[in-house]
Structure formats: C-alpha cells, structure tokens
Amino acid sequence: MKDTGGPAFPHSRLGSDADGMTLRDYFAAKAMQAHLTHDGSDDVNEIGVAKWAYEMADAMLKARNQ
C-alpha cells in the first residue's frame, strides 16, 4: 500500500470516514495543475499526465519524510 501522507485537510470533529482527500491526492492535483498550466500544449495525454502527477506526489511524500 502506498503512503498517502494521511488526510490533506484533517478535521478532528469528523470521523475517519470523512477525512476527504489524502495528502498524496492533493500533491498530485497541484503537480497536474502546474504541469497543465505551464505546458502550453493542446495535445495532452491525460493518462500520462495523471501518472506523472502521482509520481511527483510520491516523490514529494518521500522527500517530506526524509
């Protein structure tokens, strides 16, 4: 199982079923947003960009834990 970094926006009053997105998802969304904003290409491989974004998120979590 991948390290998700835990909840991105934890809230103590909400139970574990309501943690929302993980920190990994949040990092991936930010990486994807930056990539798509700065790429400037209309020809986008959506699956490739999504995989790249999660690879970046995994790298950010790894760096965060060192």
Image: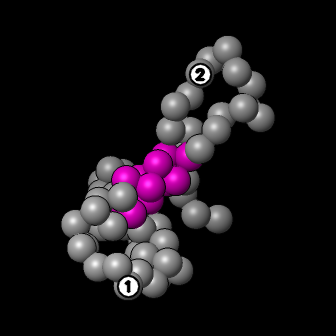
Q: Identify the residue under disc 2.
A: 11
Q: Residues within 10 Å of mark 1 (few under 14, many from 20)?
A: few
Q: Where is residue 25 in the image (x, y as percent from the top left)?
A: 52, 53
The single residue placed furthest to the front in the displayed view is 42
Please, which residue is most extreme toward the top here?
13
Upstream in the sequence, badge 1 or badge 2?
Answer: 2
Q: Where is residue 31 in the image (x, y as percent from the top left)?
A: 35, 60
Which portion, as a residue range, is magenta? 22-32
Say if residue 60 shows up in the picture.
Answer: yes
Note whether residue 61 is visible: no
Query: What secondary structure is marked by label 1?
Result: loop
Judged left or right of residue 64, residue 50 is: right
Magenta highlight on residue 25: yes
- Asked where in the image residue 12 lies, by quadrant, the reply is top right
When the figure is inspected, residue 17 is found, relative to residue 44, above or below; the finding is above
Quadrant of the image containing the C terminus? bottom left
User: Which mark identifies residue 43?
Assistant: 1
Q: Does the magenta stretch include residue 14?
A: no
Amino acid carrying label 2: it is His
> Which amino acid type is shown beneath numbered disc 1?
Asp
Residue 25 vertical position relative to residue 36 in the rendered view, above or below: above
Residue drawn at the location 64% of the way across and 38% of the way down:
20
In-front residue for pair 9/37: 37
Magenta span dominant secondary structure: helix
- Please give the name of the residue rendered at 44% of the width and 55% of the height, measured from the top-left corner: 29
Residue 63: x %, y % from top left: 30, 57
Q: Considering the image in quadrants, where does the N terminus appear?
A: bottom right
Q: Is residue 19 above or below residue 56?
A: above
